[in-house]
Image (cartoon, rainbow, N blue to C red):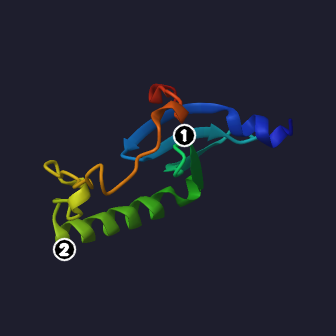
Amino acid sequence: MRENDMLEKEEIFSKVLRAGRRTYFFDVRATKADDYYITITESKKFTEADGSFHFKKHKIYLYKEDFAAFAEILEEMTSYVLNHKGEEVISERHQKDFKKEYATDEEVALPSTSSFTDIDFDDI
């Protein structure tokens, strides 16, 4: 294993935000010089037609010299959205009373559940 890979795995402090099929990981990590930086990772679950799934991950590295500007722009952007659109989620899929309309059994042939694997999502 490369030295960078070993450093990447050392987490000093972590928080997780689960948001539907997305999960955000906020990690404080240490540089070789024992200074700290933050990584923000978005992990998004994709399910295939056969029931299998995979995750796509995107990572941002945020260093101390950028914290103030990053926080300022993030605050400005989130305030802009909330001031122009409010806190209500517009997407009907995210509404508390959303009920997806499913086709009847005659319209769609569903795959056999015997080909699926029982998964415990608490391990993710």
Q: Position of residue 2 (x, y in %)?
A: 86, 39
Q: Residue furthest bottom?
A: 84
Q: Mark 2 packing: few (<14 Cα in 10 Å), some, or many (20+)?
A: few
In the rendered structure, which amino acid carries the disc numbered 2? Answer: His
- Using the image as rendered, state which of residue 43 and residue 92 is in the foreground: 92
Q: In the drawing, what numbered circle is on residue 1?
A: none
For residue 29, above or below residue 46: above
- The residue at which mark 2 appears reads as 84
- In-image side of 69 versus 107 (left or right): right
Q: In the rendered view of the protein, which quadrant contains the N terminus?
A: top right
Q: Mark 1 packing: few (<14 Cα in 10 Å), some, or many (20+)?
A: some
Q: Residue furthest right?
A: 2
Q: Position of residue 29 (x, y in %)?
A: 62, 39
Mark 2 lies on a secondary structure that is: helix
Mark 1 lies on a secondary structure that is: strand
Q: What's the residue at 54%, 34% (across, down)?
A: 115
- Using the image as rendered, state which of residue 68 and residue 9 is in the foreground: 9
For residue 83, above or below residue 40: below
Q: What's the residue at 51%, 43% (across, down)?
A: 51
- In-image side of 62 versus 121 (left or right): right
- Using the image as rendered, state which of residue 59 and residue 46 is in the foreground: 46
Q: Position of residue 35 (x, y in %)?
A: 66, 41
In space, the residues marked 2 and 1 are separated at their CA atoms by 31 Å
- The residue at which mark 1 appears reads as 27
Q: Residue furthest front?
A: 106
Numbered-mark total: 2
Q: Position of residue 74 (x, y in %)?
A: 38, 63
In the rendered structure, which amino acid carries the disc numbered 1? Answer: Asp
Of the numbered discs 2 and 1, the one sitting upstream in the chain is 1
Q: What's the residue at 33%, 68% (across, down)?
A: 77
- In-image side of 86 versus 111 (left or right): left
